[in-house]
Amino acid sequence: MSDKSIAIKIEGLKKQYRLGVIGGGTLKGDLQSWWARLRKKEDPNIKIGEKIYKKNEKFLALDGINLTIHEGERLGIIGRNGAGKSTLLKILSRVTAPTEGEIKVKGRISSMLEVGTGFNPELTGRENIYLNGAILGMTRAEVAKKIDDIIEFSECSQFIDTPVKRYSSGMYVKLAFAVAAHLDSETLIMDEVLAVGDMAFQTKCLEKMNSLSASEGRTILYVSHNMNTIRTLCNRCIVMDEGKIIFDGDVEQAINVYLSKGEDIISDHYVYDDRDRLFDSDGNITIDELRLNNSGIKAGDKIPIKLSLNSKKPKSDVRLRFEFIPAVTPKKATTMILDSKVNFEKDETKELELEIDTKHLIPSRYQVDIVAFSTDPFGNDNYLEGVFPGFVFDMEENPDDEPLLWKIYNWGAVRLHDVELKKE
């Protein structure tokens, strides 16, 4: 592609934060934190489990990003929490400035970085549409030509003259996306905000972004943890980890890299010090590490694993659930639950040796999430601990099996038994 088709060019981009000094979100919060440090007391603004940084400690959120994005591309940006995705988008949207590096942008950028970005809560929905147009450099007459389409797409016509401070988070997203999609900008940036909307509106937004890219040549930058929407929308994807781009290219390959945490060779030993949690737990039950032999696993093999669990308090009837998520399809493959219940004394660690039967799994790369839970007398599950992913493994075709004819994208990653004709 020629240089004329380049929409965004990033060279040597770095962003460094100085931690432990300011950043409470408000002047009051920063003063409270400062006064607590001065008296060597606990910071009242630190959340439970949050890392406490030393004064003047530095954190490199982006570490030498080089990236070229062409006009009309739909770029997916994926990675674990803290990888630098949102920081990159904030710099591109001019919310914050880079510490080092150069960024060249062609045309205007409209962005949705979080629910309600760019909206004044005291203004009505209609007034905020004009406000956003003015921010993009459009005249009132230019916005007026598009306002009916914006209101219709947003599905908020009944409340368009109501102050947006009374809107639900879903209504915020609907109106904000409608504004960003219909006003004149060459690049549209989206940061996970569609997760707030309902499923029908998500589908509608994805179709609109595809249409904008195809018909108008709009450039789309889209961050999401939903791999299904990444597959649906994007024609290119980058994976970020610790402020760096570790993969840039095909969408499916990028998802595979993301699910395996960017490792070329999947580790057979997982220590869970820094884990992604999908729910809060009290921290009394922890899954500390896991070992498995994942080399040359073939369809139908049994995978032996060793799992270490610890409990700070006495706990009975702890169970484990393994949730298999294949890389080739967004559908969850299957869930396997440990039949036996585990009991703990105070500060007891138990080593469990388990076998996972793969006879129904289609050959693929699998992310396996591990959840520890207990069940109350009413049958309700109480979540105790979770690691996401617990481990990742590749399963190959078994050469001794008959050729596998299975439409995995339509039927999922679990193959059920064939129907047999009853013999007379």
Image (cartoon, helix red, strand yellow):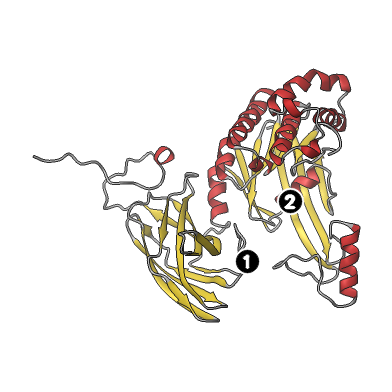
Specify the quadrant of the image occupied by residue 95.
top right
Give the residue type that dot 1 points to. Answer: Asp
Q: Is residue 248 above or below residue 188?
A: below
Q: Nearer the viewer, residue 170 or 77?
A: 170
Element class at badge 1: loop
In which quadrant is the N terminus drawn?
A: top right
Secondary structure, mark 2, is strand
Could you say where residue 339 lies in the image, as x and y percent from the top left? 37, 65
Q: Identify the residue under disc 1.
A: 274
Give the residue displayed 78% in from the left and 66% down from the top: 46
Viewer can see residue 264: yes
| Residue 377 located left or right of residue 68 | left
User: Which residue of the protein is positioned furthest toward the left in this rendering?
Assistant: 424
What residue sits 79% from the left and 35% below the top?
109
Residue 127 against residue 328 in the figure, above or below: above
Residue 159, percent from left and from top: 75, 29
- Residue at horizontal 82%, vertical 46%? 102
Label 2 sits on residue: 65
